[in-house]
Each structure stands twice: as structure tokens, then as C-alpha cells.
Amino acid sequence: MQKILVVDDIATNRKLLKNTLKSLNNYEVIEAVNGLEAITRFEEEQPDLILMDINMPEMDGRQSATAIKAIESDNYTPIIFVTALSAEDSLASALASGGDDFISKPFNIEVLESKINAHLRIRELTQQLTEKNELLINHNQHLVHEQGLIEHFFENALQQSFLDDNYIKYHMSSKSTFNGDVLLIKRGINGSMYILMGDFTGHGLTAAMGSLPVSMIFFAMASKGLAIGDIAAELNYQLLKVMPSGMFLAATLFELNTLGDTLSVWMGGMPENYWLNKEGDLKDCIHSQHMPLGVLNEDEFDFSIQTFNIEKDDKIYLYTDGITEANNPAGELFGDDRLKDTLLSYGDNRFEQVLTTLKEFTDTSEYEDDVSLLEITCNELPALDVDEQICTLPWHTSISISTHEMRSGNPVSVVSAMLGSLSSLARHQGILQVLISEMYFNALDHSILNLSSSKKVDDDQFTEYYRYREEMLQNLQDASIVFDFKYYVEHTQPYLKIRIEDSGEGYQGNEEKATEDLLHGRGLTIINSFCESVAFSEKGRVLEVLYLLS
Amino acid sequence: MNVNTEFSQDNEIYTITIDGSFDFNSLSSFRQAYSDDNIKAAKIVIDMRKTSTIDSSALGMLLNMQRHLNKADGDISIVNCNPIVAKIFAITHFGKKFSIS
């Protein structure tokens, strides 16, 4: 039921209006005797419409209307003056004070009814509009909030990149808050620097969505030091699974080794890279050899890579097509030639110069597409920060290998896996496996089986040697090989001492030195090169080596 | 231990991939990989991307293969070596016999 406030100082007038209103539409009618009371009643009762006399004691209708309109919230509350005044000036000043309409006394009931209906309808529409506005404002706040969360999410996902000024200069600008270009850089456990520069089809949030799985896969696989061909294959497979068809990622994957002299490249759907030498001359352009990621099925995917030998201070420039496809106001393209010319005509500041030239060319602060440029300076990479704590607790363990294990199993890989499971040795498992393997086969083949590896001379003898060895092994009785591992820290450096003792006749590696052509005799060379010290004792039945776990 | 082989589409390149550690236990499967007469004319590539370590018996097997196939020094390529594998090839001067990258 709608509520109407009737304001008049004369009780009969109020009664007349009240009765009329009741007869019209059974309105709830509340009353006030002057302008001041009207304000109080308005605040208390929130009426839908006010019928107001103009001349009243205490506060007249005009002042009251002004006050009510001032405290009125978003809702429109129509005020209709009921007046005997006919002078146009007075009416005009009444409306100017905040009234919305007027009706002359004595009033015609039909006119009153239609005016009330018209104003109530306006109030209703205003209310609906206010509600819709509130809804929109809420929606917008919600969107802004969500966008903030997503931005935060993206920043975190992409933040792991290795960015060292000595090696990397980069520029990325996006057409919208979210970027369809991706740049990820990570050092692998093998010391290599892995780089991924990619360009998703499209712009904005849809394009950026794909960068989440890409960054997670890339960071995880690169930090393990996996091959870029395999990383590319995994990215392709995952993108194919999660992205709608028609959306894909053009990408360049680089692996620069620790020495900074070899670059492996997998490139699909990206514009060519420019490779400049120290003097700034163009050495080569590296071209894409594959389709973008997220296009081919798993069995069609080609993860072959290109490998380049790099010299110190060579520079490689990667970019996305936002640069070459930028337009100037005349609709002309920036183009490959302009980019290449700029790169080749400037010295050390050519990176900055490309961006300046592009800006001058497009003559706008807004690029049409996401624009990314990367400069890699090839050089020996800094040693990895090893954040592992050195374990200061010394330990000592021993493993006996009996004839049975020598015959049937592969004790080297078991022992190596055991050592690798210790956190202080995990990083060294590869080299430790090599050492254990060389020591074990030295002891078994030469000391216990007493084979001479100089018999491995040509292919037939090579086969014969292993056939003979197998036979000897099967007939072997009561032999043993014992490994002792001793871990300790000296002068803050952790060491692993490996001692091997066998039950054979002893062997000291006293054969002729290995030459290039010999099929044998490299085991001790390998052991020597990885260890701090190597010593035979007990006529060669014991070999003790010291390995620095640096 | 797992040795896989593959011919390129034009049959000109024969790739041998070794998974895991390349050592004494790979002997028979590795020999198997180059025993086919069809490969004598092909360019041979040994892909070490999945190879974690090698030992001296594997070095012997590589030399033996080179001799068996009558390949000149540098004809057989060894690619995608991890740093440990690369170091072992460097220590033993295998670069003189194989082209290693």
C-alpha cells in the first residue's frame, strides 16, 4: 500500500484530502500540520508522495520542500503543492524551491488522481533505475576485484623468471592489462639458462589464460634441466588439451649452456631471430622450423631442435610480431627491414633504439598488438646459488656385494640410487654413479675375474671378451666386493670418500695408457678427472678416492 | 635400460636414443641397434637427451660401433649431451672420433 503525506495547518483541509485519497485508492495517509513536522514525518515514515500546502505557520511549504529534497536519498519523492495561490510568480518560486508539481484549490478529483498516478509512476521508475544502478556498481566492483586477484595470480606465476641485466634486456607492453605475450626465463639444475618467448593468438585475458599452464610446465621442466624438445612436446600436449581450438602459442625455446657457447633452439611459428656478433655484424638469422604449440597432435609433433655454436658476447634478438606489424598513422607497416636496419645501424644501445624508432614510427602511445623485444647477451653464466644447507653430521656406511649379486643384478645402479636418495648427495648422483661404476667394474673385471681389457681390440674380440667374461662370472665362487662410503666436512667443504675392496688378486691400472683407438682403459682417466685424490693399496685390491661435493 | 632407433623420413639419418644410464648393461641392446646392414649408408646420430650417465664400457661400445660400421672420424654425431656426459667425452677426447654437441 502506498503512503501519502498530507501537510496542511487546517484540519478540515487535511480531512478532506484524506477522505478523497482513501476513496481513490485506499492510500495510507499520514498527516503533518506544518513544514517542520513534515520533515520529521518524512524522515520517520518515508512516504511515497507528499501533498503540501504552501502557507503555513512555523515553516511554510517552500522551505519544507527544499529541506526534504536535500535529505532525500536516491529515491525520488514527489512533492505536489496544493495551493490557492494563483499568482504565477508564487507558483514559480514554489516549484523552484523543490516542489515537483502543483494543484489549485479547490481541486478537481480527477486532476488530483491523474497527477498522483503520474508522479507515483515516475517514482517507481526511478526506484527501478536506482536498483539497476546499484546492481551495476556491485557487478563492476566485483569485476575490478576479480581482475585484481587474477593480476596478482599472474604476477606470481610469472615472477620466477631469472632476470640478470648482464644477460637479458627485455621490453614487454600489452594492448590490455593482460598480456598475450609470454617471456619466461629459468636456470636449470644443469646450470643452463632456459628461455621461452611466446605469443598467444589474440590479446587480453583470453590470451593470457594460456600463460598459466605454460609457465608452470616451463618452470618445472626447465629447473630439472630437461631437453627443450621435450619441454616443447609437453607444452604442446597440455595446450592442446586445455585451449579451445583456434587458440595456440607461437613460441621460441632456448637453452644456453653454462659455458655460454652452445645454444639449442626449438622455434615454432615465431618471426626469425637476429644473431649478431660482438662487433654488431649479422651472423645469422634463426628461423622457425615448426608449427606453433597447441596445433599438432602428440604423434605428429616434431621436437627436433637446432644447435648453434655461440661466441662470447654474441647477441641474439627475439621479438613478437607486434613490432614488425605495427602501423604508422598512414597505415604503413614497421616491417622486418626497418627492424633489421635499426639493429644493425646502432651500437650497444640498439635495443633501446629499436623501441625509440618504433615509438616515433607509430606516433602513438597505444600499440595495436602486444609488443615484446628481448636481447640475450651470450656469455658464461654465473654459478647457480646453491641454497641447500651443507649437512655437517658425518656418516659412514658400507655395502657388501656377494657373488650372487655380481652374477644376477645390477648392483651399481642400486648403490647409486641409494646414495642419490640422500639430500646432501642428490645433486651429485650422476657423477657418483659414474665413479661407482668405474670402480666396481675395475674390481670385478680386472682384480676378481683377472681379465685383461687389452683383449677388447676389434669387434669380434670385443664380443668374445664379454662372452668370456660372462662365462667366468657364472663360474665364480666366494668373491666379494665391499664399498665404504664416508661423508665428512672439512674446512666447510663436504667430501665423500669412496673405498672399494675386493677379494681378487688386485689390479693397479698398470696397463698401457689409453690411446684414442683403444676400446678400453679409460676408467681410471675418468675417475682421476672427477676426484681430488685416487690411491691404490693392498696390491690393488683396495682403491680409495676422494670426491669433493661442491 | 632402453635403446630406441629411428630412421628419418628420407632414410638418410639413423638416430639411436639411449634412455637412462649408458653402461655395461646396455651392451646387447646397443649392439642390436647398429647390427642392421641398412644403416651402413645412413648418417648416424646418437641422441643422448635421455641419457643420464655413461661409463667407460659405453665408450668402448661407441668406438666398437664406429669400427664395425667403418665410419670415418667425425661421421657419427653424438647430440644433446648433459654436462656430465659431455665432460666424460671431453676428458677422454672423444671429440676426435665423434662430432659431439
Image (tube, grey):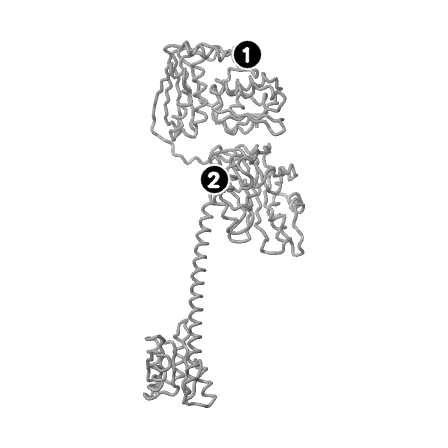
Quadrant (top left, top right, bottom left, bottom right) of the N terminus of chain A: bottom left
* Residue A469 in the image, given as x and y percentages of width and height: 46, 12
Give, as a three-letter code, the residue at label 2: Phe
Q: Toward which corner of the image does residue A457 lie, by quadrant?
A: top right
> Tag 2 or tag 1, which sits nearer the N-term?
2
Relative horizontal placement of residue A259, taking residue A32 as reference (left or right): right
Which numbered disc covers residue A430?
none
Residue A178 vertical placement versus A59 (above, below): above
Q: Toward which corner of the image does residue A266 lie, by quadrant?
A: top right
Quadrant (top left, top right, bottom left, bottom right) of the C terminus of chain A: top left
Q: What kind of element bears circle 2?
A: helix
Relative horizontal placement of residue A437, taking residue B75 as reference (left or right): left
Residue A136 vertical placement versus B24 (above, below): below
Give, as a three-letter code, the residue at label 1: Asp
Q: Toward which corner of the image does residue A109 lie, by quadrant?
A: bottom left
Which numbered disc covers residue A219?
2
Which numbered disc covers residue A460?
1
Residue nearer the viewer, A319 or A1: A1
Subunit bearing disc 1: A
* Residue A302 in the image, given as x and y percentages of width and height: 57, 35
Residue B79 vertical placement versus A345 (above, below): above
Residue nearer the viewer, B98 or B49: B49
* Residue A277 in the image, given as x and y percentages of width and height: 63, 37
Relative horizontal placement of residue A136, taking residue A4 as reference (left or right): right
Q: What kind of element bears circle 1?
A: helix
Q: CA distance from mark 1 to mark 2?
A: 48 Å
